[in-house]
Amino acid sequence: MKRIIIIGGGAAGLGAAYKVRRAAEAGHDVDCVVIEKEERVGGKLVTDILEDPEGGQYVVDGGSDAFVSTKPAVGRIARMLGIAEEMVPAREENKKTLIVKGKRLVELPDGIMMFAPTKLLPLATTSLYSWPGKFRMALDWFLPRKEHWAEGESAQDHDETLEAFVVRRMGREALDRVAEPLVGGVHASDPTQMSLAATFPNFLEMEQEFGSVIRGFLNERKKREEMRKKYPPKPGGKPWAFFNTFHRGMRDLTDGMADAVGRERIKTGVAATIIERAGDGWKVTLDSGEVVEGDALVVATEAWAATRLMRDVDAAISDLLASIPCSSSATVSLAFREEDCPFDTRWFGILSPMVEDRPILAVTLSSSKWPDRAPSGRVLLRGFIGGPGNQHLLEATDDELVETIRTQLVELLGVRADAQPLIAKVYRWTGGMPQYTLGHLDRVDEIERRSASVPGLALAGGAFRGVGIPNCIESGERAVTKVLTDLGLEYDEPKETRRGPR
């Protein structure tokens, strides 16, 4: 029997292990072992069920609280696990985003897609932008392309930063007020460094195809509307939503995969310290002193951890991994009594642009975004701290982070000044967000080229071709496909054609 060692028990590692188990169930003579340094599996997907002091429970996600329905991996995995019925769409009736501007919260205008306005009246009437800023955004309709791509060229051949692109097409206000907190916020990235080709290549492709980002998004909006008409919701079915989660939080997904893999195949609370070749196979030494041997190896850790592990295997890969910067962040969930929150709760989130110089990146109103997240009469909020420009804030203690978020909620939302949270939970993600800087895809291509030449080795995770949960799962699956092929075990799964969470 062939044995695959998987280092890392997050979404990528579990995605890899679950594919190994499916290959075994299909008749291949293969098994796996997962090594996870934390006491639990799930990586940045963690859910806690917290008790209210007066009765009832809160469902609190410490990392990502959602997945997007336009990427099929999570829905596909959930159906295979038999937990698709546990998927929950966001409460679209509360879908509203607020932007911090001075001491006010301004609603993101209707028709803004990512950062581009696609409806004239909401743009004209919003106080989010100045009139010169609005006119500058409208110029995108008339500005020529920066350049015409040659036949066969792609966004990767014409990479530029988020800042350079948005300022060039729509001006500084479009960047500072929406593109930076909304688009850059997905990756917690510095817009002056963030690679568009690696994160949102469709922006560059729209400019090429339509000559205008606004025209490109208008075309996308038209296609979405046509799809909704062509595929209306089935009677009694779940309504469609862009964001979805699971009834008891994102842990439902990772626990489901871990159970399907078999908990006996997962070693938690131990870290891999050394990986080395052992004949035609691999040997991994753990910090407990145990040595694990296998025929193939998948490294599904954060880039900074993989850098150390890969040093003695391939120094060039290690150096390339070291060139992928990683930033730290924290989420802070707080619950208050409804009477201490005298504000309209019909919204999903608040974005705080860097130009506002506040210590928060964003706030999610979890009890309005999702059903059954808090007991009746309670308001559950989640604040985000960190990002490349605010790393120093994470030196604070947990109590100080809680007070920072509480103070911001008082200032921005009008939470009563003397109100203390009924529950407070801090989650720290040290080096947890890879930064896709200019040239990122070239570095990833070289990492993949070099690892392809090493039999029985593959790397996976959010450091390469997407930080979202579906991207990480698919990264783990691709890694397993590579090492299975190296082992002479061709495994082609039946392709699912249904997209989305339903």
Image (spheres, rainbow, N blue to C red):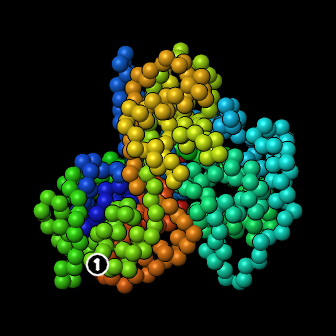
Q: Is residue 135 above or below residue 125?
A: below
List x then y, in percent, for residue 310.
31, 73
**415 or 114: nearer the eye?**
415
Question: Quick check: 322 above or below 314?
Answer: above
Q: Is residue 78 left or right of residue 195?
A: left
SS at badge 1: loop
Residue 8 location (% of width, % of height): 31, 59
Amino acid type, residue under disc 1 in the picture: Val
Quadrant that contains the N terminus: bottom left
What percent of the width, then of the height, locates residue 165? 70, 63
Residue at image position (34%, 50%) is: 42
Which residue is more in the foreground, 41 or 485?
41
- In the rendered image, residue 286, in percent from the top left (x then y), is placed at 18, 63
The residue to which callout 1 is attached is 313
Q: Is residue 207 left or right of residue 100?
A: right
| Whether residue 228 can be seen here | no
**Residue shown at the point (79%, 70%) measured from the top left:** 145
Residue displayed at 20% across by 56% down: 270
